Image: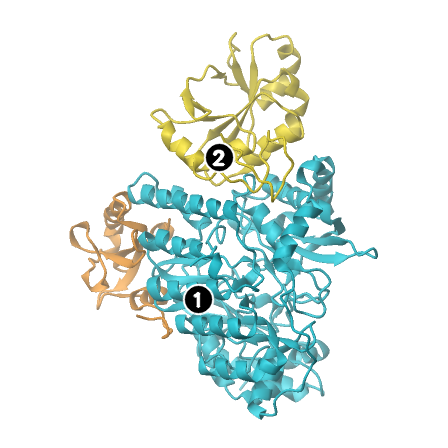
Amino acid sequence: MPLLEDGRLRPDDWTSIEDDAPLPDGPAIISLDRLRAEAAALAGRNAPLGVAVAPETQPEEIAPFLDRLALVAVRMPKPKDGRAFTQARSLREHHGFTGEIRATGHIIPDHYAMLLRCGVTTVEVPEGTDPATWTRSRDAIRVGYQAAQGADRPLSLLRRKLELA
Amino acid sequence: MNALTYPPHARTYRYDEIDREFLQERIAEFRGQIERRLAGELTEDEFKPLRLMNGLYLQLHAYMLRVAIPYGLLNSAQLRQLGRIARRWDRGFGHFTTRQNIQFNWTKLEDVPAMLEALAEVDMHAIQTSGNCIRNTTTDEYAGATPDEVVDPRVYAEILRQWSTLHPEFTWLPRKFKIAITGSPNDRVAAQVHDVGVLAKRNERGEVGFEIHAGGGLGRTPIIARKLRDWVPEAEFLAYMEAVLRVYNALGQRENIYKARIKILVRDLGDEFTQMVEREYERMPRDRYRLDPEIVAAIGAHFAPPPFASLEDQALHADPEFRQWASASVRAHRQPGYASVTISLKPIGGIPGDASADQMEAVADLAERHSFGEIRVTHVQNLVLPHVRQEDLYALWGGLRAAGLATPNIGLISDIIACPGMDYCALATARSIPIAQRISERFASLDRQHDIGECFINISGCINACGHHHVAHIGILGVDKRGEEVYQVTLGGSATNDAAIGELIGPAFSYDTIVDAVETLITTYIAHRVPGERFIDTYRRVGVTPFKDALYAPA
Amino acid sequence: MSTKAKARPATAPVVFTANRLRDGRVVWLGTAGLWRDAITETVPFAPEAAETGLALARQGERDQHVVGVYAVEVDLAGPTPLKFRERLRVQGPSVAAEAA
């Protein structure tokens, strides 16, 4: 499926790998179970590694592996299941993760701005997605009453800034 | 209509250009979402959470738009505009709710953008009045007026309002989230039955801090909140709130809607919940979430005392009818020579919380004349004029009488809380409003009501308990029994400092016999009371048995 | 979206109801898949044909005409819904002040 990044579609150069399939040489996303089980073996791997975490996974659980991860994929199983927002924010804020945070699952354009504000970088979208719908939704409201992740200013109710692109 | 025509001394939060820009953008966004829905680009499953976050429900007979009245504060221009909206897009009525909001019961989806534009003209909206997000914060209807206030809760309610508005992390919570805040040691906001209840207080140095309770609630599992912390310093208030919400968003149940409120998580985790919040709080980058004193001061300026005249307290006019009204409706004020007045939206036989467009306009006029243009909505579904000169009370009473708003029953047995029930609500299992009307008619004699004294009857039309039946002295819960409406009775609930969940007294009563049952409870109370006792006092002293015996004795 | 029709098999004749998408008003499934304001214009289905009726009604959701389709058991005289709640939906609120 294509990815949405900075409001533009781009192909996905990552591959999601089943737990029992061999790892390719290129960028690969594996499950947390596999990451745990094969941690030692994976330490020597050169190609970029990512992990897909379930909504119930606490970011603490992947904290020990973050220094060798280039991507964490969080998932919204339903549009109203918002655990991914807290996961993403926690990865950035508590764990200093600077790699790609990818949102997957049943995501609608109306989530987009809030995902970005919580530290998500890319969104997996269905084939045929019109990125204009997503950027319109992202840009619909430019005022944020809270500081977004990545903003260098502290939360300020009076000095709130236009923080979106 | 815009802020320029606001009454100059009404202390509501005044929008700035950024707030107005935000609101216009939000309306444009929702208009776009409605268009996408009508065009079939959004399914109902996708659209529903979006419309709910804009206050739009689909009820039994129509859509219902719930408009936020931030912590129950209105100025006269806003109330007048609500009346106009009621006349133009509803059937000439609005319905004030227990969460200090107003609902319009006959809304059309295609009219919603125009209604939102009309609201925006007076800096109002319907954002976050529904959906699984942080809802409108409620507070003390006598804030800024009551003699027992230690901290003005409006300032922090407004800070919470801004902080929670479209919060990027907490808009897709497991379930709705309701915060109540009080700044008085006498809890008038039912803090202990909210998702988070905040008691603002001062330490010996006069600094402001907050006692935080979490995990209270009513519904099918009524629970009194757990105290998380005795003191959170003012600067850390939002950091601590973030920590509570984060633990809830990460761990709250999402599979079973009946177990998704924070109260279930707090109950199940117990002290571990407190520890998790503390851990999150400890590791947060505090600077990022600090509530600067300048911000508090700037927002506090919106709620500065109005220009009170230098007056002295004076005796009430001698008219006995006026005195009967005043004894129920007039409350002491911190400023000598002033009083707060509660306006009953509970006329005998009326719909609790309903106000006609004419009445809204009449109250707006009276507020301008007598209360600096300021109005409050109470969680008991009444209105308050917070700052009235005692010398104006008699004239105000006359004005209220002319508008049909002077029923002298505040705090009495006909001052009933009732949810909309099955007459409007799609979730309800029984009607609430007609029960309230019939009880009110049964006790129509005001002399009798005053003799009975303070007695709170709350009625819910389903287990979700929007009518707060659990915390009433006499609680009535309507349920469906094989297609018939039946009504369960609970006794001994309280929503104040001595918060308690009422006790279910026995088998349910039919639609036809429930009013007789209430009368039996009252005659039993009268028979057992000693001088000075309210219904709840007698109940606590003599226990449930005499009431049970009277209700269920063989005929 | 309501799925009450699936809750248990119908034992009485059923009609289908929903709220109109544009204005939220109560509507009833009539002939040719058209949604009507009055229950008198609805078409009852025998209990064993309820599934067929439901499929027809669901088309109204897919066409963005209505929301929240479900079956209502009725007495054919009227027809009149058997449940009090549905009779309220036919009549409007039982309280006078806001009734049109």
B259 with respect to A2 (left or right):
right
Inspect this view and state whether residue A13 appears: yes
Chain identifier matching the yellow colour in the rendered picture: A
* Residue under pointer 2: A113
Q: Quadrant of residue A152?
A: top right
- Residue closest to the eye, B447 or B248: B447
Query: Which chain is assigned cyan?
Result: B
- The colour scheme applied to this rendered structure is by chain
Which numbered marker is on residue B80? Answer: 1
Which residue: 55% across, 83% down? B408
Q: Amino acid at mark 2?
A: Ala
- Residue B553 is at least partly visible in this image: no
Direction from residue B197 to residue C73 in the image, left or right? left
Is residue A35 toward the left or the right of residue B103 in the image?
right
Left or right placement of residue B269 versus residue B16 in this view: right
Residue B388 pos. (x, y %): 60, 75
Above or below: residue B17 compared with residue B309: above
Q: What element does badge 1 sit on?
A: helix
- Eye-nearest disc, 2 or 1: 1
